[in-house]
Amino acid sequence: MSGIVDLGECHVTQSSTLAAAALEAEVPAIVLSPSACTFWLSCGAQALGSHIRIETSSKTDTPVPLVEVVPEFGEILTDEARETALVRFVIGLALRVAGKPVMKPCILEGGELWLDREQFDGLPWRVQVELLIGKALNAKWFSGDAAAAVPVGNLRPEILVMQPAQNWHRQRATDGLDSTWDWRVLVQR
């Protein structure tokens, strides 16, 4: 994307995570400091967070514990996360950014990991594991150095199980999007 963008079509945020979603949707966005963001908004820019929502075509009624989906994580979850880290299986998971859908295999939402098995299963196994570890790190579910404690080679691809789903549509939700990405996990040993 290049050229001149009208200020009224530019979306501003303080979150690099939200800006990355906008980039995927080819929506003009810029990450600014709090004071600069306030100034741009007063000049007519749009708040990116108010133009992003999570959508699914269905979701399961009941989430399952993360340790049932990835048993190997049990050894490195915090005591609290062993009880509270949940996975909710969904279908058709996407971020709608300023009206443009961006399909996502998994998203943190409301303290749960929403996982779209159809999209997730289409990814290479290593990418699947890296996504799960990255989301667990963002949720602060791991204790200590999770990257060292869970070498990707020790995880098994056959451990994920799909739960039945029902129809559901999410109108607005950006709670789980505003977190810092931790790319240290992606380094190969």
Image (cartoon, rainbow, N blue to C red):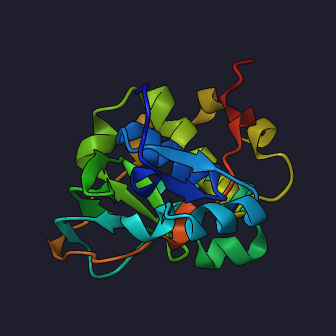
Left or right relative to 168: residue 157? right
Image quarter (top left, top right, bottom left or bottom right) of the C terminus: top right
**Near-viewer residue (110 or 146):** 110
Counting from the top left corner in percent of width and height, residue 115 is at 37, 57
Image point 39% across, 26% down: which residue? 124
Counting from the top left corner in percent of width and height, residue 97 is at 35, 55
Image point 58% across, 46% down: which residue? 30
In the rendered view, tell whether residue 141 sits above or below residue 161.
below
Residue 72 visible from this viewpoint = no
Left or right relative to 71: residue 188? right
| Residue 99, quarter of picture | bottom left
Counting from the top left corner in percent of width and height, residue 133 is at 61, 46
**Near-viewer residue (22 or 30):** 30
Residue 115 visible from this viewpoint = yes
State the count of labels.
0
Image point 53% across, 67% down: which residue? 176
**Near-viewer residue (180 or 26):** 26
Counting from the top left corner in percent of width and height, residue 179 is at 65, 59
| Residue 84, quarter of picture | bottom right
**Near-viewer residue (44 or 120):** 44
Q: Can you name the residue that lies furthest to the top here?
A: 189
Q: Can you name the residue that lies furthest to the left here?
A: 167
| Residue 58, quarter of picture | bottom left
